[in-house]
Image (cartoon, grey):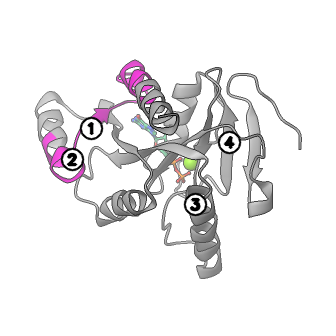
Amino acid sequence: MKTNASRGGLVAAVHRREDFPKDGHPAVAVVGRSNVGKSSLLNRLLGSVSARVGKTPGKTRGIYFYATREGHHFADLPGAGYARRSREEREGWARLADELFGSGRVTLALRLIDSRVTDSAADVEIRDYLENAGIPSLAVATKWDRLGSAERVRARRAIEAGHGAVWPVSAKTGEGIDELRREIRRSISRGEERAHG
Ligand SMILES: Nc1nc2c(ncn2[C@@H]2O[C@H](COP(=O)(O)OP(=O)(O)OP(=O)(O)O)[C@@H](O)[C@H]2O)c(=O)[nH]1
Ligand SMILES: [Mg+2]
C-alpha cells in the first residue's frame, strides 16, 4: 500500500476491512452525526485541507486515515447512521465501524456534537457505543462560532449534562483548536501510560 507520512497526508481510504492500514499506528477517530463538522475539524487539527467537506450531508464515504507529525493517525468517518443511504450501505458502514473499534488501533475517539443540537439521541448512542467498546473519548461541541455568548452558556450546560466535560471548537475561526489539540495529546499519553503499566 502507498503511504504518505507527511503532515495531513492521506494514509489509507478504507472501504473494506482489507484496506485498513497495517502499520500499527494508533488512531484518533472522529465520529458524529452526518454534517456535524467531522472533516472540517480534522482539516483544522491537521493544519491542512486534506479531508473533503460538504454542504450536503453524506460527504465522507469510507474511513480515511491521515498521518500527523506526532506519530498517530486521525480517522475520518462517515456520518453515523446517515438515514439517506441504502440499508446495505448503512450496514456496511456499521460493520466497518465495528471492525475499526474492535481492532485495538483506536486509542481515542472525538465525539462531535453540534452545539445547536444538544439533545440528539444519536449522540447518546455514539457515547454508549464507544463506552461499550472500551474506547476513551472526548466530547467536542462543533460550530461554536454560530453561537452568541448567552447561547454558549446554555449549550455548554446542556451538552455537559449528557456528555460530561466538553471541548467547544470552531473549524471556521479556529477557536478552541489549540485547547483540543493539547487535550488530545494528554489523552494519548495517559492511554500509553495505561498500556505500558
Ligand atoms: N459555521 C461553521 N460551519 C462549519 C463548521 N464546521 C463545519 N461547518 C460546515 O458544516 C458543513 C458540514 O461539514 P463537514 O466537515 O463536511 O461535516 P462532516 O461531519 O464531515 O459531514 P459528513 O462527512 O457528511 O458526515 C459544511 O458546510 C461546513 O462548512 C464550523 O466550525 N463553523
Ligand atoms: Mg465528513
Q: Which amino acid does label 2 sit on?
A: Ile
Q: Is residue 170 magenta?
A: yes
* Circle 3 residue: 102
Q: Could you tell me residue 150's position as x and y percent?
A: 10, 33
The CA span between labels 2 and 3 is 27 Å
The CA span between labels 3 and 4 is 16 Å
The CA span between labels 4 and 2 is 28 Å
When asked about the image quadrant of residue 89, the answer is bottom right
Q: In this view, does 132 lie above or below 118?
A: below
* Circle 1 residue: 166
The residues colored magenta run 157-184
The CA span between labels 2 and 1 is 7 Å
Q: Residues within 10 Å of mark 4 (few under 14, many from 20)?
A: many
* Circle 4 residue: 65
Q: Which of marks 4 and 1 is nearer the N terminus?
A: 4
Q: What residue type is labelled 4?
A: Phe
Q: Can residue 88 be seen in this view?
A: yes
Assign a secondary structure to mark 1. Answer: strand
Name the residue: 58% across, 62% down: 97
Which of 107 and 150 lies nearest the eye of the viewer?
A: 107
Q: Earlier in the sequence, mark 2 or mark 1?
A: 2
Residue 164 as seen in the image, left or right of residue 143: left
